[in-house]
Image: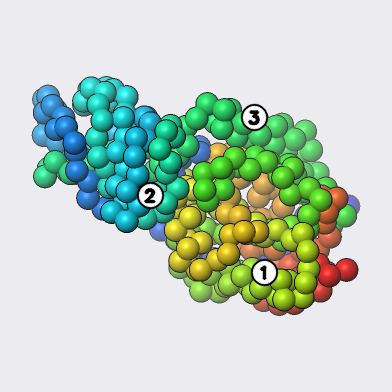
Amino acid sequence: MKSYARAAVLGAGLAMGWSACSKHPEVSAPNAGATAGTAAKAVTAPPEKKGAEKKAADRYPLTGVVVSVDVPKKILVVQHDEIPDYMPAMTMEFIVSAGDAAVAKPGQRIRAEMIPSKTGDFRLEKIWPAEKNAVDAVAAGALKLRQDTFTLGKNAYREIGESAPEFTLYDQEGRVVPSGRFRGKMVMLNFIFTRCPVATMCPASTMKMISAQKQAAAAGAKGIEFVSITLDPAYDTPGVLKEYAAGYGINTANFSFLTGPEAAVRDLLTQFGVIAELKGELIQHTLSTILIGEDGKIIHREEGSAWEPKEFVARMRK
């Protein structure tokens, strides 16, 4: 029965049509992401690159510790490790996106991509938390989810009445969020990505989640959490998600935007019955919005974006 039920869900998604939502750059390694920065300035000028002229498009993996953050100027001072074949370890000043500046904390270890320019400016993109405890927790969660999906095989799709899959991801503040944090609360969950330009897809879904959040509060519904998991973890870092939430004016007191290893996101898509495929430079995907009860079991779901927030809020009040 499960395979037929899953086919019905996926068939409904295909019937409503694929959404070719975004031009997608070359996909980075799992758990990588990007957020656009502007210019940057080095505190100490690096040595010249030997044997080749530096290019503005060059990218270098960087690891280091945040020394200070200037949020208004979008500047991070980072004490970074040696960058092989480019520069020794040193302390430098970088300009980053507004979201990355808002997420960064002094003393935090990060990994990122450094982008120099011919003018000597530097910026950081694809900034991720790199503290060992956090990285290990997210990796362990991804491995457990992978094993769970593999073990379930054809029965991986979670139907109404079954327990939602467990996961461990990062939120828009760069914090590690295990799914167990939501146990005992009702969770309204969907999948979106920040670059989706199709008004009837991710933007519409986000607006309806916001409406449901406001309606639930107005109705006096207690213990409700709203969760959006990115379909595009190669781009949607914590900083990107932070900026996305701010752009919509979302109250994140009980609304989390989650990202993490690409393999973990793929397993969650499989278990929640959402299709997302990279077709050339486009992401094609279906939409599902799911309501999970206090006991962790799925109690309602809607396909596409034609549903009304009040349909979910009515169930939250029961």
Instruction: From the top left corner, tell me how far across and down residue 231 is, in percent.
Output: 56, 53
Instruction: From the top left corner, tell me how far across and down residue 189 is, in percent.
Output: 69, 58
Placement of 172 over or under 244, stated as above or below: above
Which tag is nearer the camera, tag 2 or tag 3?
Answer: 2
- Badge 2: how crowded within 10 Å, few (<14), some, or many (20+)? many
Asked if residue 51 lies left or right of residue 159, the reply is left
Q: Amino acid at mark 2?
A: Ala
Q: Amino acid at mark 1?
A: Gln
Answer with mark 1 or mark 2, whichever residue precedes in sequence: 2
Quarter of the rendering containing residue 299? bottom right
Asked if residue 144 lies left or right of residue 45, the reply is right
Count the marks: how many? 3
- Badge 1: how crowded within 10 Å, few (<14), some, or many (20+)? many
Q: Which residue is mark 2?
A: 101
Q: Amino acid at mark 3?
A: Ala
Residue 123 visible from this viewpoint: no
Secondary structure of the residue carrying tag 1 is helix
Picture disc at residue 257: none
Secondary structure of the residue carrying tag 2 is helix
Taking the spot 81% from the left edge, 44% from the top edge, the residue there is 155
304, 31: nearer the viewer: 31
